[in-house]
Image (tube, rainbow, N blue to C red):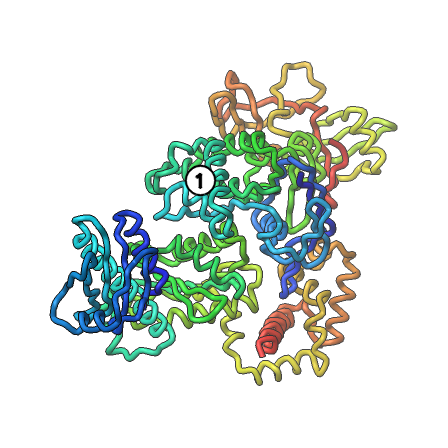
Amino acid sequence: MVSSQILKGCLDELREITRTEFCLQDTAGKIVVCTQFGQPQPETIVSAFAESAVDSQIIGTSFLLKVMDDETVSFVLTASGSGDNTFMVARMAVSELQHVSAAYKERYDRHNFFQDLLLDNLLLVDVASRARKLHISDQVSRAVILFKVGTANHEIARQTLSGLFTTQNGDYLTEVEQGSLILIKQMKTKGDNYATLDEVAETAVDMLNMEAMIKAIAAYGTVIHELKDLSKSFKEAKMAMDVGRIFYADKTVISYNRLGIGRLVYQLPRNLCRIFIREIFGEDESAAFDPEVTTTVSTFFENNLNVSETARKLFIHRNTLVYRIEKLEKQTGLDVRRFDDALTLKVALMVCSYIKYIESQE
Amino acid sequence: MASLSLKDICKVYPNGFQAVKNFNMEIEDKEFIIFVGPSGCGKSTTLRMIAGLEDISSGEFKIDGKLMNDVEPKDRDIAMVFQNYALYPHMTVYDNMAFGLKLRKVPKDEIDKAVKEAAKILDLSHLLDRKPKALSGGQRQRVAMGRAIVRSPKVFLMDEPLSNLDAKLRVQMRTEIAKLHQRLGTTIIYVTHDQTEAMTLGSRIVVMKDGVVQQIDSPQNLYDKPDNLFVAGFMGSPQMNFIDAVARVNGNSAALEVAGQTIPLPADKAKAVVAGGYNGKTVVLGIRPENILETTGNEEYAFKSTCNVYELLGAEVFLYFDLEGANITARVEPTTKVRPGDTVSYTFDTKKIHIFDKETEKVIAN
């Protein structure tokens, strides 16, 4: 339903232009909106007119017209003015109100349609027919880009993104929870690929940073070619967002196609992860979360297990690094200078990050 | 007024990755500071911490003496221009520039004033009614700048704003940014991996590598007096030539032995070599391409190599040859008669020689 504020805005502007006063009443005669000097009609007259077969009626200097919605009367408009053109102006006003109502309805329905589609709330047989009704092309390549912007910044982020991605271009912006925005991005040409999606997501994040001045992370799913698969792309984007936040915290754009080992760890059952962590770190898991250990090991991995280079990067003496490595070996039985042990520890630290994230969510 | 203070700033991600290590710097009002370095060196992360888009793991960041670590980006009185900008396609230039202020519910008359002033500065006044598709690449870039200018911030943060432009437009926009800094008189922090951009724009340059500041200095000092091998190699195009040499000390004088030739060092450089105890040790000799000179016949020493490549750039010529396995580039006058295959006889301008410790890579003498 169009808000009264929008209807009032339409009629006030028409009044400004034409000097005609308007009053919009529902079919029972209740006033919906009125311009400054609009003349509402008695409820009995309005309801009788709404039920009559005529399209318009003249009462004194006022014209009554019906505002239709799908062949049923939704409102009665009273236009009052001294000019000869009052009736014509009243008809124009009715036309505008009908179009505003139709456009709003279509938009509102599209919003619901996409939300239902993303959340798998639609029967497959209904997808194509509802899409046709809403003028949404079914056989077009699309992908879902999910933006995490935080609850406090939701509205400002929505306004920024809706300025960039418009329905005229086949893109659609919607949301299913506060703090996240979902962009259904239409791939325009055959050449559009994941590099294009990356570029779009990066631009959107940079724009949210620059224009809205908010932190934002984007994650996107795979490109789908039928509307019914949209929820698949959405689920992938959600998973990419989770995996990215756990394992790739330095990235602001995460692609479902490039999740690396994080994808595997994320799929592991929680019990299995706990058993694995206990196996590596024993009962005391604190070593896995000690910043000194994580920084040392991470730098050691970055430098291809090279002790001298790692010591140089960490600004510590080589012997200090060796001491730290040996201390870790005592705790875990893993000597990270050996490839096999380094690999085990790398996975173990990733599993720890995953469990830590899961626990923080709980 | 906007002075920035960064003390022991560190960024460590939850997986232990240290993106920035102990960043220390004081930035004065109206300075044009450049963060430069190869990709992954932490320059963008530092900028994002200043912007408030990344949390600071440890250290203190202040603007005009006020601690900003936990202040939201919108409350830091900054404006940003990043690499990936887009203009709102269905809005006019005016609305594009006004949009950020509208989002922040700034009164209409203030927005109007700010947009018109910014348009005047950027020479966009006649384009305010146009849509982005009717603009050239340079004009679009100026609109993107305008969106930052309308905020009248204390500090501008720019992260490779020109990297999506073609070479010609980049040069043009570089000049525009320099002019803009002069007109606005605001502090600018600018991130780039392009050392030409860094040298031409910055009043001071911060060279970074692996999250660590290598040197902070004026462009000329960075070029003439690099602190280490990395800075020496990174600044300058073509880059500085590096050749292994053995230091020989004789009393208070010193020389470098390269390819069977002995290069006597000027007194100041000799003093540093003597004091460092480098006698008999291998050091790295650095020489800029423009400091390699064709011999005249009166030199104490001369090298001979075969020219491999000759590159004419109009106002200058680059000659490429090998010396003791090192690739050497010389920048010479276009009148040179040397061509590929010719034997070149050349010497170094000894006053311009740089000497580096081979192990620590730190400078011994500039």
Residue A186 appears in the rendering: no
Q: Quadrant of residue B347?
A: top right
Q: Is residue A112 left or right of residue A65?
A: right
- Which residue is at a point 38% across and 75% down the rendered structure image? A119
Where, by quadrant of the figure, is residue A336 drawn?
A: bottom right
Q: Position of residue B80 (x, y in %)?
A: 54, 46
At label 1, which amino acid type do we have? Val
Q: Is residue A16 left or right of residue B189?
A: left
Q: Which corner quadrant holds the N terminus of chain B? A: top right
**Extreme residue toward the front, this view:** A60
Q: Residue at x 51, y 24 (%)?
A: B317
Please name the residue that numbered disc 1 is placed on: B143
Q: Give the left or right position of residue B159, taking residue A139 as reference.
A: right
Residue B187 at what x, y percent from top left? 62, 38
Chain bearing mark 1:
B
Q: Residue at x 70, y 82 (%)?
A: A282
**Image: A118 above or below A213:** below
